Image (cartoon, helix red, strand yellow):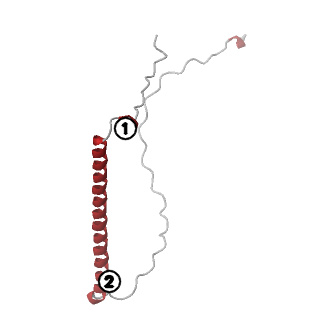
Amino acid sequence: MADDTVTRQGRQGPQGARGEIGPQGKPGVRGEAGPRGEPGPPGQLPSIEQVMPWLHLLFDAYEDYKRLREREAQEASEREAAEREALEAIEHDDASGDDEDDDHHRKDKKKKHKHKDKDKK
C-alpha cells in the first residue's frame, strides 16, 4: 500500500530577509533632436532713437494705469464714507425713535438644538 502515504502541505514559514539591490542598468538609446525654432530677424538691434517712442508709449500707459487706480481708490473711499454716514444717520434715527419700533427691527435669534447621542445608555 504505497498510496497510503498522503502528503499534506503545512503552513507557510516566516518571510526571509530581503536581498541586495542589483546593479544599475545601462541608459537607453538617446532619441533624435527636436525641430529647431524659427530663425530670428537678421541684422542689428534697433537704435535708441527707434526705441524711445515705444518707451514713451509704455510709460504713458503706465501713468494712465496708476491714475485710474488712484481714482478708483478715491471713489471707493468716498463710497465707504457715504455708507458710514448713512448708517450713522439710521442709528441716530433709531435711537431717537419709539420703543415700539424696536420689536419690529429686532432680528429673532435662531435656537440651537443639541443633538442627543442615541448610543448613550
Q: How many marks?
A: 2
Front-most of residues 8 and 102: 102
Residue 19 screen position, x and y as percent: 43, 35
Residue 54 screen position, x and y as percent: 32, 83
Q: Give the numbered dot on residue 54.
A: 2
Front-most of residues 19 and 116: 116
Task: Give the residue at x 33% y 38%.
Answer: 98
Front-most of residues 27 and 48: 48
Task: Give the side of residue 29 with respect to residue 4, left or right.
Answer: left
- Mark 1 touches mark 2? (CB < 8 Å): no
Front-most of residues 57 and 63: 63
Residue 81 screen position, x and y as percent: 27, 56
Task: Give the residue at x 42% y 27%.
Answer: 112
SS label for mark 2? helix
Disc 1 from disc 2: Cα separation: 66 Å
SS label for mark 1? helix
Q: Quadrant of the N terminus?
A: top right
Residue 38 screen position, x and y as percent: 45, 79
* Crowd class of label 2 (few under 14; some 14 to 19; many from 20; radius 10 Å): few
Determine which residue is flagged by label 1.
101
Task: Give the residue at x 40% y 37%.
Answer: 104
Q: Is residue 20 above or below residue 87?
A: above
Could you tell me the amino acid type at mark 1?
A: Asp
Mark 1 or mark 2: which comes first in sequence?
2
Give the label, 1 or 2, closer to the camera.
Answer: 1
Task: Give the residue at x 50% y 21%.
Answer: 13
Task: Give the side of residue 76 with respect to residue 14, left or right.
Answer: left
Q: Is residue 9 above or below residue 84?
A: above
Could you tell me the amino acid type at mark 2?
A: Trp
